[in-house]
Amino acid sequence: MALEKKHEQLNDEILALAKAGDYVSIKKNVDLQRKISEILQEKQKEQEIFDKRNFQDDILYQKAQELGDQELLDKFHSHSLTREKYINACKNLNIDLWVDYYYDCNFLAKYDEVWEFDEDGFASVELNRDMGLINIKEWKELCEPKYDWLHRNSKYKIAIAGYRPLCLLIDKDWKEFYKVKASAIDDFDEYGIAKILYPENKKICYVDTTGKEFRKHPFKKNSKR
């Protein structure tokens, strides 16, 4: 849904830029819109194939269609129906075929929770309260769940993760390139700078996307130490 909305927003932005005569920005927006269109078209193709191969013979899917349960159908279509959610739905609808469903041949089945996929196809997953990362485009687990928390910044292609007492930065090849003993690391801002929070707020500093630390925010004069 986020990509569809962005595609529509770009139409308005392009019109506004055309009125202003900003042709350089128009080209950037048109190129971005074209890329989004390609992604949406590919997703549609994948969705059609996925629907035909997996859903039609599934008892729960048939029941959701019969009841007009759009919320449950959407979970099938968005690949967000984990094993736990599937089994709970089967219980609620008195369906006794919990193992006979499409996720049995899908690696998403083993996770307790699957978060929304970003524009690059990455999503955080949870298993037994541990966090990991997967890539839906490659159907690949990049890291088995082992972190207390994990978030990937799609702009900078960097994951921020942690397990007590360490916080880490992880690059696009899933290599940990920065570690620090801290309570948390905030997400990167528009300058590519993230705030490091130390236990009991005794100290605050900053780190960039290369792992370089700063006592103050290098681009904001009023940042706290």
Image: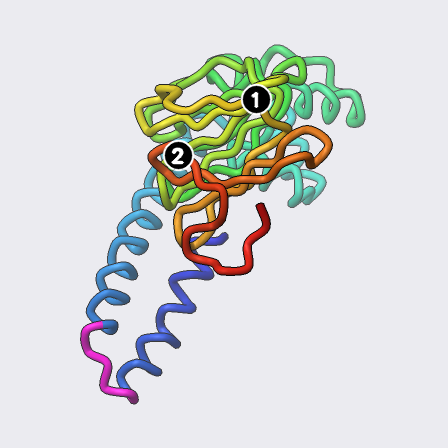
Numbered disc 1: secondary structure: strand
Q: Which residue is mark 1?
A: 181
Count of all numbered marks drawn on residues in the image: 2
Q: Is residue 20 magenta?
A: yes
Q: Name the residue type under label 2.
A: Ile
Residue 83 drawn at (x, y percent): 62, 19
Residue contact between numbered discs 1 and 2, judged by CB atoms under 8 Å: no
- Vertical placement of residue 19 versus 88, above or below: below
Residue 178 drawn at (x, y percent): 41, 24
The residue drawn where x is 49% and y is 31% is 160
Q: Which residues are magenta?
A: 19-24
Q: Is residue 167 magenta?
A: no
Q: For this view, does 130 lie left or right of residue 43? A: right
Q: For this view, does 34 lie left or right of residue 91? A: left
Q: Give the quarter of the image for residue 174.
A: top left
Q: Give the mark toward the camera: 1 or 2.
A: 1
Q: For this view, does 156 lie left or right of residue 103? A: left
Q: Which residue is mark 2?
A: 158
Q: Earlier in the sequence, mark 1 or mark 2?
A: 2
- Vertical placement of residue 22 versus 51, above or below: below
For the question of whether residue 57 can be seen, the reply is no
Q: Name the residue type under label 1.
A: Lys
- Vertical placement of residue 91 versus 172, above or below: above
The residue drawn where x is 40% and y is 40% is 208
Work out how far the residue at label 1 is from the one at label 2, CA to CA, in angstroms: 19 Å
Residue 16 drawn at (x, y percent): 35, 83
